[in-house]
Amino acid sequence: MDFSLSEEHLMIQEAARDFAQNELLPGVIERDDEQRFPTEQIKKMGELGFMGMMVDPKYNGSGMDTMSYVIAMEELSKVDASASVVVSVNNSLVCYGLETYGTEEQKEKYLKRLASGEIIGAFCLSEPEAGSDATSQKTTAIDKGDHYIINGTKNWITNGNSAEVYLVIAQTDKEKGHKGINALIVEKGAEGFEIGPKENKLGIRGSDTHSLIFNDVKVPKENRIGEDGFGFKFAMKTLSGGRIGIAAQALGIAAGAYELALKYSKERKAFGTEISNHQAIAFKLADMHTQIQAARHLVYKAAWDKDQDNNYDLSGAMAKLYASQVAMETTVEAVQIHGGNGFVKDYHVERLMRDAKITQIYEGTSEIQKIVISRSVLKD
Ligand code: CAA
């Protein structure tokens, strides 16, 4: 077993780290404060190949493996989780979903532009009454022969306004339960498709989260992904990979807060010495370092499983469950190590602490990950 990163992975890590320091760090506090979307930064990430990292180059992707993706996600998330969630949704949910299950026409028409970062996409599953309980979709997509008519509301949609392409999960035949659900590609500007107000969030405030309203939106049949009734499985399969991306985001948030706390503890003096010389602080750093390394191993294992074509439902859920818990715990400790400075915006750790919370909620709450993990464990 080899725990070292390859030359290629090290290069990607360095490129993502440089980008995060040079392009994401400047203005990150202001973007969070003003809830401003990182438009320029996302455009540049598209040019560098970060928006379609795992997509085949023939569809304008970078043709990299999942390992490269999680390494990049960690580095970007150390600095700006608002930007990294845009990267994550575009890569793991939208591009992956279209490349794996889309038709050749859909790939030509949508994937190429999404993978190059020319446009970004959104994944629309959650509803006011169907967040965790994803089979209870109220949004309908009624079959009208050569097209569907969508009606309903989606909630908490990442890239809600900034996206151009939306993958919408909706119920076609209620009688069939989850087997009556479809996934449809909806373009921004479609008649009857309205973008609701932007959510004012605790964290990842630079990303735009909206509700979406569908009023008799007509979608051609060729925009359905997969066979009739494949929508729920499409969502589950896509989310399984998405959870690896969010686990890597959580890891990055934790590692970013830890690095800041480590640096601060060697500079800040109290009781006549640097605070890192006090065991109360040194032991916190020891715990944080250990937790982060354990989370990283889980994230890498899940990415490796995906790259090996192993089933990654379990390893992805474990990585997300643990890394998001570590993100929450270590960011709280990073604020504590910073003392009063940790409570003010200039030191970044309060933002990382706020950003950490969403990693325990989106793409399946921690409780959902435990359902996935316990079902897998009990089945054996
Ligand atoms: N891969 C393939 N198929 C799967 C699957 C997977 N990972 N998980 C479930 N399925 C299939 C099952 O095999 C079953 O099919 P059959 O009937 O043919 O056997 C079908 O789907 C229904 O499965 P369950 O009976 O297990 O469904 P359930 O109602 O018990 O729900 C759940 C399972 C795991 C709780 C699921 O509902 C779930 O994951 N919920 C959370 C949804 C979620 O993550 N929401 C987040 C929104 S997206 C987001 O946050 C994006 C963003 O903006 C950042």
Image: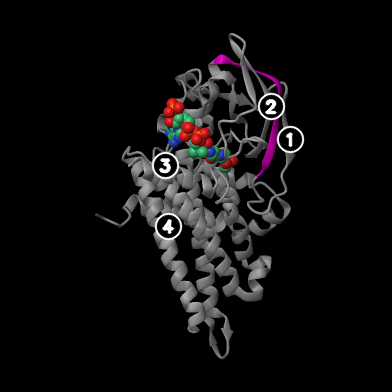
Tell me the kind of residue under disc 3: Arg
Residue on which the image places disc 2 = 152
Residue 174: x %, y % from top left: 59, 21
Work out how far the residue at label 2 is from the one at label 1, CA to CA, in angstroms: 12 Å
Cα–Cα gap, marks 2 and 3 = 31 Å
Q: Residue furthest front?
A: 378
Can you say whether 379 is above or below 194 in the image? Answer: below
Nearest to N terminus: mark 4 or mark 1? 1
Q: How many marks?
A: 4
- Nearer the viewer's eye, disc 3 or disc 1? 3
Q: Amino acid at mark 4?
A: Ala
Q: Which residue is mark 1?
A: 196
Q: Which residues are magenta?
A: 208-221
Q: Which structural element holds mark 1?
A: strand
Q: Residue at x 54, y 24 (%)?
A: 177
Tell me how far mark 4 sits from mark 3, CA to CA. 21 Å
> What residue does disc 3 label?
375
- The Cα–Cα distance between marks 4 and 2, rounded to whole angstroms, is 38 Å
* Quarter of the rendering occupied by the N terminus: bottom left
Q: Position of residue 66 (x, y in %)?
A: 39, 43
Who is closer to the viewer here, 314 or 15? Answer: 314
- Does ligand 1 reach within 8 Å of label 3's beta carbon? yes
Which of the numbered marks, if any, corresponds to residue 295?
4
Residue 215 disc label: none
